[in-house]
Amino acid sequence: KAGVTQTPRYLIKTRGQQVTLSCSPISGHRSVSWYQQTPGQGLQFLFEYFSETQRNKGNFPGRFSGRQFSNSRSEMNVSTLELGDSALYLCASSFTSERQYFGPGTRLTVL
Amino acid sequence: AQSVTQLDSQVPVFEEAPVELRCNYSSSVSVYLFWYVQYPNQGLQLLLKYLSGSTLVKGINGFEAEFNKSQTSFHLRKPSVHISDTAEYFCAVGAQGGSEKLVFGKGTKLTVNP
């Protein structure tokens, strides 16, 4: 089976712009979660989608949003980018809560 | 709510020496426990997990961990490390039943020196 794929792998944006990141889960997995990883804050949970519904949400401002499509692919969007949004964004998919599979991440740099 | 504390941010060791990476957690509900490894510019790879049953869990690459409920700990060990084990290691906790949300520790950077 193919693993979790994330596109693009690297992205450079400027402050005030918006960005959309994409995640394709492992075939058969219906849950997709997103995490932000920064040197200062570590790995922080953004949100989780299951069958196109947001099931859980972390403590991030409304500028961070996501959605999931009927084929379980997910996108996350960050509007009005700030310098502090520079991070590695990781997507994980799972069939049950007993194991999540992580993608390679998207490295976002905000200038 | 859950929280995870990794007691050492950096652990330097020599090749073939044993290593222990410490992790403590707190939770008001039953949890699953995980250790992940991250190599530079890569995602997270699962090393091992504790779901239930035997408190000693064996994982990939010769790692093992012991779940201690009374001390709320889940320390990771390897009897003999290799240069290739140099990476960052994350302990994580997830609540049993329902949500896929994981709460991670801050990570421990393991450096194996020749």
Image (cartoon, coloured by chain):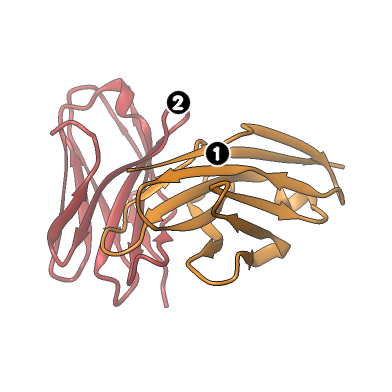
Q: Quadrant of residue B22?
A: top right
Residue B114 appears in the rendering: yes
On the image, the x and y values in percent for residue B50 come to 52, 63
Task: Tell me the residue at 54%/46% (across/down).
Answer: B90
Residue B40 appears in the rendering: no
Do callouts 2 and 1 mark residues in contact (Cβ within 8 Å)?
Answer: no
Looking at the rendering, in which quadrant would you find the C terminus of chain B?
Answer: top right
Residue A40: give its label.
2
Q: In which quarter of the image is residue B48?
A: bottom right
The amino acid marked with disc number 1 is: Gly
How many badges with numbers are in the image?
2
Up-down relation of residue A33 to residue B114 (above or below): below
The shade of chain B is orange
Residue B29: give its label.
none
Residue located beneath label 1 in the image: B107
The shade of chain A is red
Task: Tell me the residue at 64%/45% (across/down).
Answer: B87
Q: Distance between the residues labelled 2 and 1?
A: 11 Å
The amino acid marked with disc number 2 is: Gly
On the image, the x and y values in percent for residue A62 come to 13, 34
Task: Tell me the residue at 69%/63% (across/down).
Answer: B61
Task: Tell me the residue at 29%/72% (across/down).
Answer: A29
Q: Residue placed farthest to the front in the image?
A: B70
> Seen in the image, is B91 located left or right of residue A69?
right
Q: Which chain carries label 2?
A: A
Along the line of sight, which residue is nearer the eye, A66 or A110? Answer: A66
On the image, the x and y values in percent for residue A26 come to 35, 70
Up-down relation of residue B82 to residue A5 (above or below): above
| Same-subunit check for callouts 2 and 1 | no
On the image, the x and y values in percent for residue A56 come to 20, 51
SS at badge 2: loop
